[in-house]
Each structure stands twice: as C-alpha cells, then as structure tokens.
Image: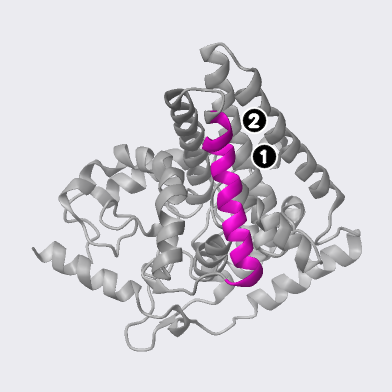
Amino acid sequence: MQNQQTYRESTKRAKEPAKMLKFGKNTGFQIELTRRVNELFQTTGLRERDCPQMYLKTAILLLSFLVVYVSLVFLAQAWWVVLSLSILLGLVMAGIGFNIQHDGSHNAYSNYPWVNKLMAATMDLIGFSSYYWLWGHTVLHHKYVNITGYDTDFDLGTLARKTPFQPWLPHHRWQHYYIWLLYGVYPIHWHFVSDFESFFLEEFYDRHYPRPKGVNLAIFLVGKAVFFTLAFGLPLMFHSVWTVLMCYVVTSFTLGIVLNVVFLYAHEVEEATFPMPLEDTGIIENDWAIHQIETTVNFPCNHLMTWFVGGLNYQIEHHLFPNICHVNYPAISRVVEETCQEFGVKYKKHKSIWAGISSHFHWMRRLGMANTMSI
Ligand SMILES: [Zn+2]
C-alpha cells in the first residue's frame, strides 16, 4: 500500500514542468571544452556537419534496407532464409535509427534544416514518429539525462524500477531477467500504442504535448501509412497472416533489443550517477556539462561496430556535442578525455560491450532488490 502511494507521488512529480529544472553555475569546464573542440575543427579541417562519409553511410543503409526488404518479401523461400532476413532487417532498421534519424533529429546531419528534417523522418520509415522522438529523446532525455521524473527513457511505469528514486514493487526482483523481453517488445508497443496515444490524447509521458501540425502532421500521417504498408499491407498480398506476423515480431524484437542495449546501457549502469534536483530550489547542483559526463559511460568498439552504432559508443561526446555529426566523435573524444583529466572530471568507459551489458544486468538486479536504495 505504501509502495502504491509512493508510486503515485513519483508519477505526480514526473508531471511537473521540465522547464522548472535548472543546472548549477558554469565552472569554466564547459567553456574551455567548447573552445578546444572549436579549435579542433578549425585546425584539422574536419567538418561539423554535411560530412561526405555520412552521405555515403546513408546511401549504404537505405540501399541495404531496400535489398533486405525486397529479398524477404519477394525472394525468400526456406524458413531459415526468412528468419535470417527478418533478423537482418531489424539490424538494418536499427542502423538507420542510430545513424541517419539520430543525427537528423539532433540537427547534426547537415547545415540545411530541411536535410535534417528529411533524415529525421527515416524514423517514421521504421515505424516511430520522428515528431514524438524529437520531444522524448532530443529534448527531455538529452537535457535531463538520468534525472528521475524528467528523463523519459526511464519511464516504464510500474513494469520496471530503473532509478533509485522510483518506488520498488515486489515483481521488480525479477526485472533483470524480464527487462530484455520488454526491450524486445518496445518497438511493437511504439508502433501500435505509443504514437497513437500521444497523438489522440495530446500527451507524451504524462506531459501535455500538442498534436503535430502542417509539415509535421503530414510526416506523421504519411510515415504511418508507409510503415504499415511495408510491414503488413504489401507482405500480406503474397504471404499468410502467420508468416507476416512472425517476420514482423522477429524484426521488431531484434530492433528493440539492439536499440535499447546501445541507447540505455550508456546511462542505466552501475557506473553512472542519478542526481536529483534540490528540493527547495529545483536546481541540479552540477554544471550542465559535468552532469552529462557523470551520468554517461562510453564503451569500446571496433571500427565496424562504431560505424554501425552511429558513434553511440562515444555517448559522452554525443551528449556534450549532440549537434555535431557523429563521424567526428573519435576525434572529439581525445579532446574531451584530456580536458576531463585536467579538470578532475571522471571520464568513464566500460572495458567492453559485454562489460556494459553485464553492468546493466547487475544494475537492474540491484534496483530490483527489496528495501535497497529506496526513496
Ligand atoms: Zn541523442
């Protein structure tokens, strides 16, 4: 009963307007870091946006999407080929999400706003509204990362306890096992529920948010029409309902696991911090840039994996400079790490991808234990 009460209080807090939250005084760290990164671009000739390798990557990923989709719907016969192509399609869709839409939605793809808008709209192609993604990810998550009640990435309702400041419920003791199933189901929920709920109720994660208008409305409607035609309309003309549903589930599950693992374990791990604003002033004590670094953990990848995940293994750099094209993160990371050392800011990296996954598993288990880290 007490937990239910606490849950209601926590939900109420989440509805407080995000604009009330402020960060502490600039310590000089951010100014110096920005100066050094600007200098990097001026002295090396690197381009912040409109990078040729990004346009090439876009062509490769969209062409891969077309080839895999056509092969799956029109050519594949054997069950194992269908299964493999369904998984591959999920991976290519994740690649589009990590690279093209993500840079577009952060205005990091191009200096031309219409190019960014077009690239961000590839999110609609893979079944998520770019309009609502922009609000949840680019605004709330990025600005208020790891702050309970503000960062919407934590919001799984009562299904999981993802920060020490969310109330504990008995079923959370198994969350480190079943959370992976929720990650897999996440795209299906988004495709059929989240976007439509946000659209018709004019609410997004308990916050009032207006329906898209004009160009945004057109992208929303055309995006939904294209996605549902590709996912169900066209395949159903050639295959049975069960075959189409199975392929959709396998593709979506792959997409969900990969998206969540890469996006979440940079923040929802034992090494990250989970600050809360001061009760009386509503201020987060830290400098904004230091807050971003302390709540984020990088992970090492080889070149191919870095290419695939859109540089999101450099999450610290992404959070500090979200409007710079991700192909520049490896170069920026050297400047960031050096500046952190000088200013005594802890720059955290997982030892490997698996170490990051393991840390997320252990963090979920700790949060799921009764009477630990309760608010
Ligand atoms: Zn981002």
Residue type at mark 2 is: Tyr
CA gap between label 1 and label 2 equals 18 Å
| Residue beneath disc 2 | 69
Q: Nearer the viewer, residue 62 or 294?
A: 62
Q: Nearer the viewer, residue 233 or 287?
A: 233
Q: Residue furthest left?
A: 1
Residue type at mark 1 is: Phe
Q: Is residue 234 magenta?
A: yes
Q: Is residue 77 left or right of residue 203?
A: right
Using the image, determine if residue 70 lies above or below residue 76: below
Residue drawn at x 14%, y 62% is 3
Q: Main secondary structure of the magenta part?
A: helix
Using the image, determine if residue 174 lies above or below residue 198: above
Q: Is residue 95 left or right of residue 205?
A: right
Q: Residues within 10 Å of mark 2 (few under 14, many from 20)?
A: many
Q: Which numbered tag is attached to residue 138?
A: none
| Residue 106 locus on image (x, y percent) | 66, 63
**Applied colour scheme:** one colour
In this orientation, does residue 312 appear?
A: no
Give the tally of numbered discs. 2
Residue drawn at x 75%, y 57% is 325
Mark 2 CB within 8 Å of ligand 1: no
| Residue beneath disc 1 | 308
Quadrant position of the N terminus in the picture: bottom left
Mark 1 CB within 8 Å of ligand 1: no
Quadrant position of the C terminus in the picture: bottom left
Q: Which residues are magenta?
A: 213-235
Give the mark nearest the N terminus, 1 or 2.
2
Using the image, determine if residue 211 lies above or below residue 67: below
Secondary structure beneath dot 2 equals helix
